[in-house]
Image (spheres, helix red, strand yellow):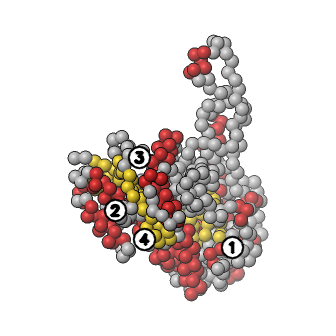
Amino acid sequence: MREVVVEADGGSRGNPGPAGYGAVVLDPATGETLAEAAEYIGVATNNVAEYKGLVAGLKAARELFPDATVHVRMDSKLVVEQMSGRWKIKHPDMKPLAAEAGRVFPAGRVRYEWIPRERNKHADRLANEAMDAGKRGRQWEPSASTAGLDASAARNAAAPPPSGPPGDATAGAARARAALAGSSGGGGTATAGGTATSGGTATGAATGPTAGTRAGAPAGSATGPGAWPGAVSRPATPDAGPDAGSDDGLFAAEEAVTASVASGDFEAEAGALAPVGHAARAHAPATDGPAARAAAPGVGADATEGAAPAPGGTTALAPAAGHATAPAPAAGRATAPVSAADRATAPAARPQVPAAPRQGWAGPDMGAPATFVLLRHGETALTPEKRFSGSGGSDPELSAAGLRQAEAVAEALAARGTIQEIVSSPLTRCRQTAGAVAARLGLDVRIEQGLRETDFGAWEGLTFGEVRERHPEDLDAWLASPKAAPTGGGESFATVARRVAATRDRLTAAYAGRTVLLVTHVTPIKTLVRLALGAPPESLFRMELSAASISAVAYYADGNASVRLLNDTSHLRG
């Protein structure tokens, strides 16, 4: 029985917004393109577009080989898990599309596999061509498509992907320095400092009636729209549409606005008030390496749930907090290798020519990173009062203001249209915030215990001043050491940091190449940012996070991380 591979994708520029899908049928042995399908489908969500792409790909395969077995590969975890029967289909728009896909071939002849976005570039490019055509008031035409040619070129130029899970900036920087120090002029350089050499692509494909199909094009594809928040350096992708290599501007350093109004983030206030401890050590030089990390395992104080969002919006990261810096290239000059052809024609005593020192961060393509969009939950009744509100207290619900904030951030994320997964802390305020976003995006919410807030013990519900009056010695110890726990058996910052780091590692492995919304609290967000920067524990007292603010960190396959955004509240100012 003949087997074919179907790769499908779909995207929506707005979610919901102008949408299109792409699908390709491949020979599994040779990689030859047997058929292509793409269509602009009008206004729809990412998930609808992805399902429509699946249906179109299956129908194209059936037209070629009605009795074939089909191996479907998509970068949509939602579609793959639902069509495999492991996840329930809850959204009313998805149910008829899933049923239609299930009727194209008998269930026993179709198997589904999730693949990273960078391996689904052919279908992604087709989807973007369809959306570009729709923007011009047309439908996709096979004769005008370059997706197959671009995919073939991208595949031929691709370097072998590096291995290893993403980790802290300090660990990645150490590996980069070791690689630079030990390599010769002809060797590759490691990517450092979280610098990306390839951008992400927008969510996948839409399906529906097959507006255009084509046979005989090469397999593969070029990149499509950059996944929000995208890579630091995106390669240019001609003809990929206005979103292909663009940045939404939120991550440019020159656009960061320093907020001067307090957010109610108690940790930042504590850092300003504390005479000793973390705040006093904030200007000490940062160290780098395993020994330093072992001595200071991590800290993140979500002391209180913050006050009203700062009208300044984004708070830029200050260099004084000991953030990690990019390692310098190794000293000395590398020797350029001599090719086989040179050796065949050159005299035996021909000297080797010294190569110029390597500059910049040019290195192998790391592929699309795992990007965490970090959303702090909306306000609760405790937020404006600046009271400690962790995981050991009353578990308050969102206030009326918090519910409005949740709707505002949901609208903003839907407009950007790049969130592919949602993971939330188990606490009520986060589940409510995540639920508002999920309802707009048509996604499910996964609960992750590791994203819960710090347990503040006997300090739960108290203000900083009340803790100072009742437990002055414990408070001083807490401010002075990440290993000190709040009164009454709460969690130390070091304990929380270990929990958050383990959660980070699980999620980056599970969502490699995906853009994931993590709805959580001040402590976990600050801890993720601190670890990504390789900054010392006291740096958390120099960050500020407003309620319903957005931050972002990208994690690359070489172990490096890149902080893209901190404390953006622009969506709350409309």
Q: Position of residue 299 (x, y in %)?
A: 62, 63
Residue 326 vs residue 287, the one in the foreground: 326
Q: Quadrant of the C terminus?
A: bottom right
Query: Which mark lies nearer to you, 1 or 2?
Result: 2
Picture layout, residue 286 above or below residue 376: above
Q: Is the residue under label 3 in contact with that under label 2 (CB below 8 Å)? A: no
- Residue at image x 31%, y 49%? 4
Residue type, mark 4 in image: Asp
For disc 3, the marked residue is 217
Precedes in sequence: disc 2 or disc 4: 2
Query: Which mark lies nearer to you, 2 or 4?
Result: 2
Residue 292 vs residue 481, the one in the foreground: 292
For disc 2, the marked residue is 55
Residue type, mark 2 in image: Val
Residue 230 vs residue 55, the one in the foreground: 55
Q: Is the residue under label 1 in contact with that under label 3 (CB below 8 Å)? A: no
Q: Is the residue under label 1 in contact with that under label 4 (CB below 8 Å)? A: no
Report the Cα–Cα distance between label 3 and label 1.
Answer: 48 Å
For disc 1, the marked residue is 313
For disc 4, the marked residue is 444
Residue type, mark 3 in image: Ala
Mark 4: few, some, or many residues within 10 Å (few <14, many ≥20)? many
Horizontally, is 298 left or right of 220 in the view? Answer: right
Query: Which mark lies nearer to you, 2 or 3?
Result: 3
Precedes in sequence: disc 1 or disc 2: 2
Local secondary structure at mark 2? helix
